[in-house]
Image: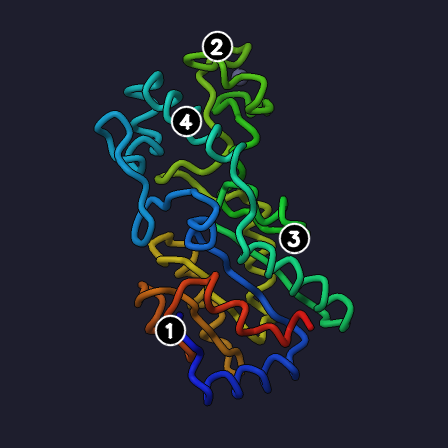
Amino acid sequence: MTQILKEVDQQLKDLLQKSYSIALFVGAGTSVESGIGTFRGEGQMSYFEGVPPAYLCTVKALEKSPQLCWKFFNHLYSILQKSKPSSSHQFISSWQKEAERRKIVRFNVITSNFDGLLSRAGVEKVQELYGNIDQSICTTCQRLFNTSDIISQPIPRCECGQILKPNFSLLNDYANEKAYDETVAITRGCQIWFLIGTSGVHKHSLTFTQAVKSRPRATLVEINPRDSFLTKYVHFSIKGKAEDILPQFDYVTA
Ligand SMILES: [Zn+2]
């Protein structure tokens, strides 16, 4: 297990004690322990019927092969139904509760994950940038459905006739507008920006990280097994899996 360097550990401890506005950007690396593969990098999902999952989660694939895509979404949904929040999700939940107790003014959690596991671990007000698989949406009339109600259909359709899509952002799709706006506001006042288990390939994680970086007194901390697209922007890069590194911040939950 990787230990946080002693010097880094002390500097972060001092910073965290003084900060009143902390934000965590949480990526797919935190869900690997829950048995959910990532689309890229560490813990990648295996091909589904010979097709890369990242391709099946595109608008183009849904238009071209709706039945195969929905077969994959069904597979993904059943994995998520059976999975449990990871120790990282639970740690973040305890951290948030302790932050509230200590009256840290702003403790925000943003995620690129659509598995809903942070909320299931008890984290409140999670900004789910790319939505959540628990709902599906009609791309024409925007009607929302509970995924559990429509998942048994080979190609779920809306009453208007249009094919539904899971209400998470397909990979060449857009971020959830409300979560996006909230995150823009979060980056403005943020003193410490943590990037946890994210490869940084999502353009939004880059945009937000650059926004925080442009603030003169903000500190950026990355926790990831290896360098990501975002490493060059951070002040502290801690190499390791979130599940090994986060417990070393135990003083924030004590
Ligand atoms: Zn419709």
Q: Earlier in the sequence, mark 4 or mark 2?
A: 4
Q: Which residue is mark 1?
A: 233
Q: Position of residue 34 (x, y in %)?
A: 48, 46
1 or 4: tag closer to the N-terminus:
4
Residue 180 at x, y percent in the picture: 54, 51
Q: Of marks 3 and 1, which one's residue comes earlier in the chain?
A: 3
Residue 124 location in percent, x, y?
68, 52
Residue displayed at 67% across by 61% down: 94
Say which of marks 3 and 4 sits in front: 4
* Mark 2 secondary-structure assignment: loop
Sequence-earlier tag: 3 or 4:
4
Horizontally, is 69 left or right of 153 in the view?
A: left
Label 3 sits on a secondary structure element that is: loop
* Residue 158 versus residue 199 in the image, above or below: above
Count up the numbered dots.
4
Q: What residue appears at the point 46 percent right and 75 percent down from the top-left corner?
A: 214
Residue type indicated by callout 1: Tyr
- Residue on which disc 4 sits: 75
> Which residue is located at x 36 percent, y 58 percent?
200
Quadrant the N terminus occupies? bottom left
In three-dimensional space, the C-alpha distance between marks 3 and 4, rounded to whole angstroms, equals 26 Å
Judge depth for marks 2 and 3 and give the one in front. Answer: 3
Residue type, numbered disc 4: His
Mark 2 or mark 1: name the one nearer the start of the chain. Answer: 2
3D distance between C-alphas at marks 3 and 1: 27 Å
Specify the color scheme. rainbow
Q: Mark 2 is on which residue type?
A: Gly
